[in-house]
């Protein structure tokens, strides 16, 4: 991982902790921290913020981060995240406001883990698996084919199954089925 990633991760952690903002690193960076060495071009951070305080929360990043969209709050209303770029490191950071019960639970359950000598709040591997099952993009499916077998012995399968069933209520009945298929995968598949 490059120095730019490390400096940006350290800045996110410092900034969130100094301002009392609960957060969790999710996405590709969390995938790497949970043991799958692959590339990523940005840092995804989920923060605990209400819609009506999002502007003030984002202002805490304003001195060192610039929005990559001309109207970041309007973009957020459409896409539910705000893309920023660190002024010095030039790293892209996608700030996601944890609005749903599941997203808030992800932050609450996050663990303080070390990466490149930096302590960070990182989503649990179970929550990462669930997020990737829901996103279901080709790269997420590839990540799952490595993450599940690599972490199989330490997975909280009961938690995974319970949370997967909750997605049925939001018309994602495929999530429990996909989870069960992954849990039956005997060994790690390598991406080509």
Image (spheres, rainbow, N blue to C red):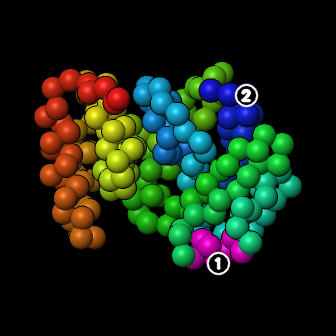
Position of the C terminus, as image quadrant, is top left
User: Which residue is depicted at the point 21% across and 46% down?
Assistant: 179
- Nearer-the-camera pick, 61 or 75: 75
User: Which residue is depicted at the point 15% across and 26% down?
Assistant: 186
x and y percentages locating residue 120 in the rendered image = 60, 35
- Nearer-the-camera pick, 45 or 103: 45
User: Which residue is depicted at the point 28% across and 35% down?
Assistant: 145
Position of the N terminus, as image quadrant, is top right
Judged from this view, the residue extending furthest toward the front is 192
Position of residue 164 in the picture relative to residue 39 (left or right) = left
Label ID, residue 13: none
Q: Which residues are magenta?
A: 71-77
Residue 183, above or below 22: above
Q: Residues within 10 Å of mark 1 (few under 14, many from 20)?
A: few
x and y percentages locating residue 69 in the rendered image = 70, 67
CA distance for labels 1 and 2: 32 Å
Residue 24, above or below 52: above
Magenta: main secondary structure equals: helix
N-terminal of the pair, mark 1 or mark 2, is 2
Q: Which residue is mark 1?
A: 74
- Nearer-the-camera pick, 69 or 17: 69
x and y percentages locating residue 97 in the rendered image = 57, 62
Position of residue 167 in the picture relative to residue 125 (left or right) = left
Q: Which residue is mark 2?
A: 3
Position of residue 79 in the picture relative to residue 180 (left or right) = right
x and y percentages locating residue 102 in the rendered image = 39, 59
Secondary structure beneath dot 1 equals: helix
The reply to whether the magenta stretch includes residue 4 is no
Picture quadrant of residue 114 = top right
Secondary structure beneath dot 2 equals: helix
């Amino acid at each position: 991982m490059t120095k730019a990633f490390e400096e940006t991760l350290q800045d996110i952690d410092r900034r969130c902790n100094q301002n009392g903002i609960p957060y969790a690193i999710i996405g590709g960076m969390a995938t790497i921290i949970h043991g799958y060495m692959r590339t990523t071009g940005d840092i995804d951070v989920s923060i605990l913020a209400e819609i009506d305080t999002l502007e003030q929360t984002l202002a805490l990043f304003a001195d060192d981060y610039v929005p990559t969209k001309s109207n970041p709050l309007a973009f957020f209303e459409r896409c539910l995240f705000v893309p920023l770029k660190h002024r010095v490191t030039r790293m892209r950071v996608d700030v996601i406001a944890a609005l749903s019960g599941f997203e808030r639970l992800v932050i609450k359950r996050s663990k303080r883990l070390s990466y490149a000598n930096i302590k960070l709040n990182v989503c649990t591997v179970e929550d990462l698996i669930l997020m990737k099952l829901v996103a279901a993009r080709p790269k997420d499916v590839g990540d799952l084919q490595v993450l599940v077998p690599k972490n199989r012995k330490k997975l909280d399968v009961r938690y995974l199954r319970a949370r997967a069933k909750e997605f049925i209520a939001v018309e994602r009945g495929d999530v429990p089925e996909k989870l069960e298929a992954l849990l039956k995968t005997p060994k790690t598949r390598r991406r080509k």
